[in-house]
Amino acid sequence: MSEKLWGGRFSTGTDSLVEEFSASIAVDRRLYAQDILGSMAHARMLGRVGVLTPEEVATIVSGLGEVRSEIEAGRMVFRPALEDIHMHIESRLTELVGEVGKKLHTARSRNDQVATDLRLYAREALDDLRGAVGRLQEVFIDLAEREADTVMPGFTHMQVAQPVSFGHHCLAYVEMLHRDSQRLADARTRVNVLPLGAAALAGTTFPIDRWDVARQLGFAAIAENSLDAVSDRDFVMEILADLAILAVHLSRLAEELILWMSPPFAFIDLPDSFCTGSSIMPQKKNPDVAELVRGKSGRVIGDLVALLVLMKGQPLAYNRDNQEDKEGFFDALDSVRASVEILARMLPGLTVRREAMRVQAEKGFATATDLADYLVRKGLPFRDAHAVVGRAVRLAQERAMALEAMPLTELQALSPLIGEDVYAVLTLEGSLNARRHPGGTAPETVRAAATRARDRLHRE
Ligand code: ARG
């Protein structure tokens, strides 16, 4: 007889290589608290429907509490022969409370058990991550208010395009993070459904009360189909997709921080406590935190792709392949959570080199569009105005001067519509202040947008 909980039909023990190969305890021990909560709820329900006696329920529930204390005190012995967290908890329970422990698995399978554990874990992780994303949004909103009047060159194609408020740039990340947070909240509604009761795949012959378990565990619904309940992992795929998008947003931010801190830009500096040095080059101060955030996004994207591929060939219902879902899921959650946290800690210490930003904005003919708009207001069709300003830029470039340094007579030679009032239009502040519509970059508009973003965040 094998010592396995499922060993009845086997004549020999499991090859030790197979035990090692198939064990998931190193990864799924993380689910111990969810597994115990789920088991307690299941046992109480079995008591209420008369499958277990009240005494049996009390013994099982208090035994499970003891197992939890042992795990939390680091006293639980984990071994590959017991495969996964579910078997570890059940067998330790039976060691502690005796025969009655063996009744816990009535009307249940590890298949619906692991799906339940994972959903409970995901629910908590989503709530926790949304809190962290909110804190990062708050950091950006603070920065946006502080830097609403700071002019930086906005880029397209990495070429200077138009001046923008640095605060406006910060609020762009607030919007991305807001949608990320909404996506996570939306995913939560599909996570919050109880699989338990599906048993292995076909349901159970016992008169279970699935709503009782759902209520105990705070699930808003019960899975409608037992096959689907145990076999799909679309809730994990969906969260991984959301995490990958979030990680891509963080990676773009990280890339900007890295560029901005490099001496040719010198737009910002990051606190010494968030940078690292070089073991050979004494002068170096490197933005490693930002680089790691950018790097971790690659892992998260990989975790999503790995799960999509893991699922695509699986016939219904449960297959052991599914056990491979957890490592990437935890990895992605950890990577994104840590990235969000460290950015929220680092960014309040950001030094903004306003002068360097301004110098670059002045260099790149950033107000050329403002000049074209000016000519349109004087009656020229936009396409003609565009051509006039193109010639003005070429002239200014030949002379190595800024547009606003060109004498009025020369500008008027390009278009007689140009008057003395053009110079106000060509300043960086003039350019920003002219964009006062909702979503625009005028400092006043940015401050109002920051206030709205803060209110929205506090309403969530
Ligand atoms: N450890 C498994 C998993 O993570 C759950 C157990 C189901 N195993 C089984 N042989 N039916 O998916």
Image (cartoon, grey):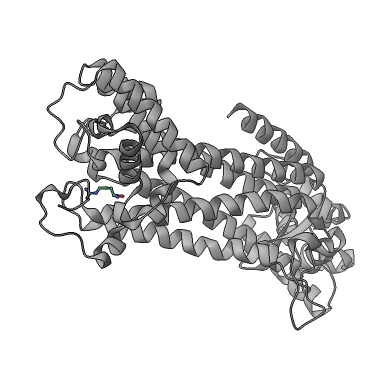
Q: Is residue 448 visible?
A: yes
Nearest the viewer among 359 and 174 is: 174
| Quadrant hosting residue 313 | bottom left
Residue 391 percent across, percent down from the top left: 72, 71
Q: With 67 as the anchor, is 23 left or right in this view?
A: left
Nearest the viewer among 2 and 293 is: 2
Using the image, determine if residue 448 lies above or below residue 216. Answer: below
Residue 385 percent across, percent down from the top left: 68, 60
Residue at 23% of width from left, 21% of height from top?
52
Nearest the viewer among 363 and 170 is: 170
Q: With 49 as the anchor, is 166 left or right in this view?
A: right
Residue 343 percent across, percent down from the top left: 67, 53
Nearest the viewer among 256 and 97 is: 97
Using the image, determine if residue 90 lies above or below residue 194. Answer: below
Residue at the far bottom in the pictured view: 280
Residue at 63% of width from left, 44% of height from top?
174
Q: Is residue 211 visible?
A: no
Using the image, determine if residue 321 lies above or below residue 160. Answer: above
User: How many labels sit on residues?
Assistant: 0
Quarter of the picture containing the C terminus is top right
Residue at 31% of width from left, 39% of height from top?
90
Residue at 59% of width from left, 55% of height from top?
250
